[in-house]
Image (cartoon, rainbow, N blue to C red):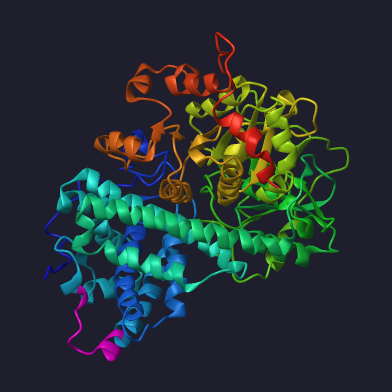
Amino acid sequence: MPAGHNLDMEDFEPTNAMWCYQCEQTSGGTGCVKQGVCGKTPEVAALQDMLVHKLKELAFYAHKLRTSEKNAEDAAANEFTLDGLFSTLTNVNFDAERFVTFLRDAEEHIERLKKCYESELGTGAPTLIEESAKHYPIVGGETYMKHLKDGKIESLAEMGVHVGVQQKKKDVDNDALVGLQEMLVYGLKGTAAYADHARLLGQMDNTVYAFLHEALYFLMTDKCLDVGACVDMNLKCGASNFHVMELLSKGHEQFGTPTPHMVNCKPKPGKCILVSGHDMYYLHELLKQTEGKGINVYTHGEMMPAHMYPTLRAYTHLVGHYGTAWNNQQRQFPKFPGAILVTTNCIMPLDQHSSYENRIFSISVVGADRVAHVNGTDFSAVIKAAQEAEGFKEGEEQFAYKLPGVRVLPDSLQVGYSYQHILANAGAIIDLIKAGKINRFYLIGGCDGSEGERSFYTDLAQQISNKSVILTLGCGKFRIMHLAKQLGNVEGTEIPRILDMGQCNDAFGAIMVAVALSKAFNCTVNELPLSIVLSWFEQKAVAVLLTLMHLGVKPLHIGPKLPGFVHPSLIPVLHEKFGITPLATPEEVAKDVTPDQWATFRHLVELSHPVPPKEEKKEEGLFSRIKIFAGNFM
């Protein structure tokens, strides 16, 4: 039987202060080694690595208890697993002290599960060190526990470096394999984040916890040293995430069936609160607590789809949307004259000269230095900050912030083209296809970021045929939403050519639309006139990618850069087996040409401009089948 070993810090001397490549903006496309581009310090990076490591130890006991004859569940450990994984997501928590608390809580859960494990399975049951892989270091003992008790961040961080990616690269000695292992870790983080949103809305089941523990346990055993096993577990993560997104979609049903709605993007006079993140639950609680207090509430970033839910927009003091994607908050938040509540990712660390540190608040697992934290759902401190702030004044007709480049948001944006609404109006869509007024669909969305290469998505939306319809979701929508008026409607209709389907988790809805279309047209999803162009950034996007890989949807155009954890040797395999297609080749990136000159860009544009046949032939192919099977759609 393989056996792990106790952590020996003399065995390995890290080359860098940290190593993090879990998000798209990682330094040089390879890894952040001095400080995170996101603002994460080496200490926080190491504490996060230690927390994930400890969650694997917790998972050992949870998985063994669950799969034993006792079939034991531990609700507290289950929920802590979600919180622990979610807290390590990019741009969620930068507070080192909070991670010390997480690590202390982890030890309490581990100790409780260990006692239950030994009691239920007896002294002859395999121990943690016996079951773990030979490369897997067990962290514990008097030194670690003393540092934890004393809250010595530097000492704990020094130990955390020895369980991170640098240590794995040295012990496993196979960068491609380590990348696959880390892809699974990041997929688990994204799945846990979505599961946390669903849990708040009363939607959760034990199969999700069971998979998270199974996968974390897998990562501490010799099984994770097999490439095929790692690929299979990643696909299993995709299946689990699909189920979680379905649960989250059901959770949102309590706010009513989404419908199209024009969202105001101009200020209204009065005191105000801005809500950023993803959690509709916290927005709803805030709306209830601010009702009748003379405070207007605005959404920010991925909270904009809140306006498509009848129950939420029934609150008349939910007056509009302010700002764009997360990466612009350091220029937009200072211009907001009220309190700011960040419910989930993304939060950016405050700079030294921040003007809003006295009026920004975090909640749940979110945290950052100099940001006040709300415990539970008592928003009295947020309300007080809003009442004390200046608020918008009479006569202000536009928000004061400016967007990068030449982008200008209109006075209103339309949301609410959810999968429920699209499927309810499927007949009209089919008629437009039959009439030749729609020839292709593009799913352009995901996460936004600051890189110039992200102009790819804006340029693509502008250059595709006017017979194309764009489905968009996530904060990546802000790369194209300002084009809504320019792109107009489908010919002869009031249907916009840009249809906002919602948040990043509403990728579930996009999948539902594609599946329904394929059934109606008697073809596979991959035969549909649909191009998927994903803008990835963090670990939720990794979870969605794994879901699409699990479902066999391809090709999947991903960018602007491939993840740093995807080793170059894996790219041909991922392309052949899963249709993963980078937006640019390494050669195109090296040439430093603009994205609209990349071959993938030109190909995607050409797909919307089909070349007419040289001689008239009998109609064949997919659109022929669309006409034949249109009646099956309703």
Residue 232 in the image, given as x and y percentages of width and height: 31, 54
- Is residue 317 toward the left or the right of residue 199 in the image? right
Report which quarter residue 413 is drawn in. Answer: top right
Marker count (numbered): 0
> In the rendered structure, does residue 571 fall within the stretch colored magenta?
no
Res 439 visible? yes
> Image check: 395 left or right of 529?
right
Task: Please check the rendered image and state whether residue 127 is part of the magenta-colored stretch, yes or no.
Answer: yes
The answer to which image quadrant residue 492 occupies is top right
In the rendered structure, which segment of residues is drawn in magenta? 117-128
* Residue 401 appearing in the image: no
**Residue 582 appears in which quarter of the rendering?**
top left
Q: Residue 289: x, y in percent? A: 76, 67
The residue at the point 32 percent across, 87 percent down is 116
- Residue at x 40%, y 70% (from the top left corner): 210
Residue 332 coordinates in the image, percent (x, y): 64, 40
Left or right of 442 on screen, residue 216:
left
Residue positioned most to the right: 394
Q: Position of residue 420 (x, y in %)?
A: 69, 51
Instruction: Please tell me which residue lies in front, 299 or 437.
Output: 437
Residue at left offset 51%, top offset 29%: 454
Q: In the visual, does 222 lie left or right of 239?
A: left
